[in-house]
Image: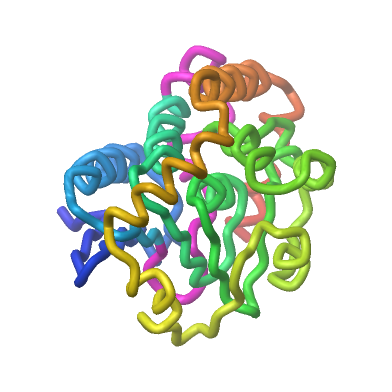
Amino acid sequence: MSQLILVEKKEGYAVLTLNRPEKMNAISKQMTEEFYQAVIELKKENLKFLVVTGAGDRAFCAGGDLRELHGEMNAEQAYATLHPMKEVLYELATFPVPTIAVLNGQARGGGCEIATACDFRYGTESASFGFVQANLGIIPGWGGGTLLYQRVKSDIAAHWLMDADMYTAKQVYRIGWLHKMITVNWGEDIFSSFLNKTPEQMKIFKRQYMEHMDLQTLSERMDREVRQCSLLWESDEHKEAVRNFEAKRKR
């Protein structure tokens, strides 16, 4: 069985790659398990920073795999399926050194949630990004909406979540969600300013950053968002939206 999460250790940092390019790196249950274990293991390493990216050049991540996140689950089943990825996002958000999402292509739905769990986001100029969950009759299901309020101004976060539209790289750079625009053929040079720091410096910088995140309640607030999404999973609006999406995909 092929690895769905690839981990490559470099000089001073590690790269974690979502490795399901034929499915636009959509997250499956097996992928979630591998993702969590990889992040936990990397916490033990003496890194300067962690990079999270996707395989291929089409997408960073298209969100959850609809074969497993289908519309027929009840609220409890949805919560049991969604919650493990919330734990992945929390571990990313509280990782001991800075995390950088390198968005090699579009990020949609849960893909934006993963990117938002990282401290910084670098994206290709041609890509688009969107919290589109509201168009499916739900809200972010992995706690990424809660994290979005930590990353950009609250009114901008609220508008993007409710708007549920795909934004260009220039748009998300302007609102502060994207920190750097890169080319498709990006290389290690995009990390040059981080590479000349020590692991000790980066750990201190990350601790300072997390002091502004109200960590005492972050996990609880993310859990609450997952629970609220799970309750919406049973709605007719969500079931119809998933059926329509799957019908379009089969055409």
Instruction: For residue 180, say whether it is visible.
Output: yes
Q: In the image, is residue 177 above or below residue 171?
A: above
Q: Is residue 67 magenta?
A: yes
Q: Residue 155: x and y, percent?
A: 84, 41
Q: In the image, is residue 65 above or below residue 9?
A: above
**Quadrant (top left/top right/bottom left/bottom right) for the C terminus:** bottom right
Q: Is residue 182 magenta?
A: no
Q: Residue 9: x and y, percent?
A: 19, 65
Specify the quadrant of the image occupied by residue 172: bottom right
Q: Nearer the viewer, residue 116 or 28?
A: 116
How would you classify the magenta stretch by its main secondary structure? Answer: loop
Q: Residue 86: x and y, percent?
A: 46, 31
- Residue in the picture at 61% in, 66% down: 179
The magenta segment is 53-80
Given the current orientation, which residue lies at the most extreme top position? 76
- Residue in the picture at 49% in, 63% down: 60
Q: Nearer the viewer, residue 156 or 5?
A: 156
Give the color scheme: rainbow, by chain, secondary structure or one colour: rainbow
Horizontal side of 27 relative to 231 (left or right) equals: left
Horizontal side of 134 relative to 89 (left or right) equals: right
- Residue in the picture at 46% in, 17% down: 77
Q: In the image, is residue 81 above or below residue 150?
A: above
- Residue in the picture at 59% in, 72% down: 180
Q: Residue 144: x and y, percent?
A: 58, 38
Label count reads 0
Instruction: For residue 19, say whether it is visible.
Output: no
